Image: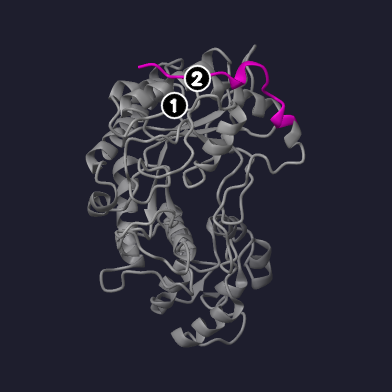
Amino acid sequence: MEIRITENMSVMDKLGILSDAAKYDVACTSSGVDRQGTKGGIGNAVAGGICHSFSADGRCISLLKILFTNECIYDCKYCLNRRSSDVPRASFTPEEVCELTMEFYRRNYIEGLFLSSGILYSPDYTMELIYQTIYRLRTYYHFNGYIHVKAIPGADSSLIYKTGLVADRMSVNLELPTAEGLKLLAPNKQRRNILGPMRLIQDGIKTSKNELMVYKKAEKFVPAGQSTQMIIGATGESDYQIMSVSENLYQKFDLKRVFYSAFVHVNDDKDLPALPGGPPLLREHRLYQADWLLRFYGFKAEELLSESRPNFNILLDPKCDWALRHLELFPVEVNRADYSTLLRVPGIGVKSAQRIITARRNTKLGFEQLKKLGVVLKRALYFITCSGRMQYPVKIEEDYITRNLLYHKEKLPFDLNGIKYQQLSLFDDTQSGLMAGMIQGGQNGQYRINM
């Protein structure tokens, strides 16, 4: 199929198409990197993270989140921008992305840039355009803010490495949890072409850190680390398979985050599930909760699920579900339990566990103190004692505790009834008139990218 570069289209029209086309890419993260402002430059990046806004379903919308192009040479069955889709097509030029980023930043609409892309002509060609964009933004515009870009699988390693020297975070989309699923729904993509850039980025980060320990002015490579994304519900993998894949990615590639994107039915294809109930958002939510347990709570995938019990309990969060299946370990005495044991108690998080360890050095803790320390007692009270006593007389029985936990109901991050899967538009702002008029003059000319 012939690739057509959009002509006679304004930058704002392109922005409307390419910001909307980026909404299904959820791997949009905070910075985790420090970069001071420089004389003559603009912006900075703070390790504490960007001040985000979030949509109702939890997706980040604070960065200028766009595709460089929604043209694509591939025909992935789940993708709205697949080659055979009849959708409006557009492509930015590197200069247009730079000007948009700077103009939005100056108006305080954004704190950084998230740039992904379809595949224009070839992986190398697309990766080169992305590199030119970010390099120009850093050197010509002196932009010191946060930049997250996608590494294009199949692109030359030298292009990916050069981009990593000017970006804060990079990510390579795993697309689907297993190679079998990829072969079924994205036959043009190969698992090794995805894992290859991941390994390259991992090695580059390690080398950069080692050099910085010796030479303080050594070049930083992807200082905020790398992440990935996989689509959930398009293929038949169980939650156990998905969590096992995530665990391996964390262990073998030192990823900062694995993102889970609930499959949205945007194309008609016999190989795609019908999903009459809509995107599996609650399943996505449970996977994120379990992912948190893997990264911060010391759990392993095989503790949470197994081949005989391959999927999460939809009614209970994974930590409560695990505790109910291991009641022989409870109740836990909060005044004596070590940190790792406290982390396994429902209702006790990382911060509250740290506060408990600190506070009990000076006093015996009771339930009132635990509440002030951030413990969620409506869940924790079934699993803890303070000085040998429980808050109320309770039965350490699975059915009894389950009924009481379900009675309180879990507060979900979205309303499952009638939820719409959409990203906040950059134009949903009372000052949108300013944006509409920010680029004038020669922005409506013809643009063609020459090979």
Tell me, yes or no, if residue 363 can be seen here: yes
* Magenta highlight on residue 443: yes
- The amino acid on which the numbered mark 1 sits, given as a three-letter code, is Ile
Asked which quadrant contains residue 8, the reply is top right
| In this picture, residue 15 sits left or right of residue 440 | left
| In this picture, residue 92 sits left or right of residue 123 | right
Q: Give coordinates of residue 220: x percent, y percent.
A: 43, 22
Tell me, yes or no, if residue 397 can be seen here: no
Q: Give coordinates of residue 339: x percent, y percent.
A: 48, 59
* Residue at image mark 1: 5
Q: Give coordinates of residue 225: x percent, y percent.
A: 43, 35
Asked which quadrant contains residue 321, the reply is bottom left
* Residue at image mark 2: 447
Residue found at x 57% / y 45%: 60
What segment carries the magenta color?
434-451
Whether pointer 1 and pointer 2 mark residues with C-beta atoms closer than 8 Å, the reply is: yes
Quadrant for the N terminus in the image: top left
Cα–Cα gap, marks 1 and 2:
8 Å
Q: Is 289 in front, or is 154?
A: 154
Q: Is 289 in front, or is 102?
A: 102
Above or below, 220 relative to 13: above
Disc 1 on helix, strand or loop?
Answer: loop
Quadrant for the C terminus in the image: top left
- The amino acid on which the numbered mark 2 sits, given as a three-letter code, is Tyr
User: Secondary structure of the magenta portion, mostly?
Assistant: loop
Above or below, 426 relative to 313: above
Query: Residue 126 bears which disc, if any?
Result: none
* Magenta highlight on residue 412: no
| In this picture, residue 342 sits left or right of residue 62 | left
Mark toward the start of the polypeptide (1 vs 2): 1
Asked which quadrant contains residue 84, the reply is top left
